[in-house]
Amino acid sequence: MRTFATTVALFMLAGASPASADARQVFWKDLRPANQPAAESLGLPVVAASLPDHGETLAWNEPDTTVELKGYALPVDREGEMVYQFLLVPWSGACSHMPTPPPNQIVLITLPKPFHLERTYAAVAVTGLLKQDMERSQLFIMDGLAVIPSGYVFSKATVAPADGVPDAIEAPQGPNPWESLQKKQ
């Protein structure tokens, strides 16, 4: 049986605080208007360019409520595996390998202490105060520089690895272009 001190130590190692157990679970659907769908069709996420308001209508407005939101971390400012700032996005590959989600589906996280991120798009749980704030972040991606708008920010954020993202959209996987180059045996 774990002692309270052991539980606190485990939370600290994971980058979370014991208070995160009391946080309200928020889902990506809570950040967009109810009439904005999550997907355009089976497996294809809604992208900012396809919306009349470009996804700038924000739905979440409880800035004094401690919440937890799970998503995928896309580093904005990093030094090796230590991340100081990242975008939390609802699906893996968003912004760099796939089209950009609407701003109401992107959260900018700036940390007081860096978080150890082993890989881009790792699933993480962020706990803190979620606030509306339209920001723009510059990312260097394969095609060059991209400016990504986000509709929300977290303050007093803590980050911990997550097992998955409960309401993530799984993007369809096309054929692997490298398979045709492999030798047939």
Image (cartoon, rainbow, N blue to C red):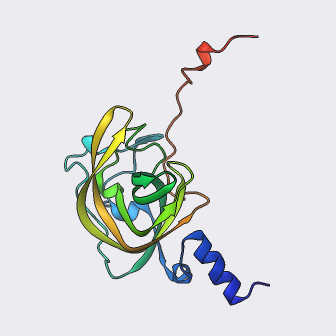
Give the farthest residue toward the front.
Answer: 79
Q: Quadrant of residue 8?
A: bottom right
Q: Quadrant of the C terminus?
A: top right
Q: Nearer the viewer, residue 38 or 25?
A: 25
Task: Give the residue at x 35% y 56%.
Answer: 106
Q: Nearer the viewer, residue 106 or 57?
A: 106
Vertical position of residue 159 compared to residue 182: above or below: below
Image spot of residue 41 (x, y percent): 42, 39
Vertical position of residue 175 compared to residue 42: above or below: above
Task: Give the residue at x 44% y 75%.
Answer: 67
Q: Quadrant of the N terminus?
A: bottom right
Task: Give the residue at x 64% y 80%.
Answer: 9
Q: Quadrant of residue 98?
A: top left
Q: Nearer the viewer, residue 89 or 14?
A: 14
Give the farthest residue toward the bottom.
Answer: 4
Image spot of residue 7 (x, y percent): 67, 82
Image spot of residue 34 (x, y percent): 33, 61
Give the farthest residue toward the top.
Answer: 184
- Tally of marks: 0
Give the farthest residue toward the right.
Answer: 1
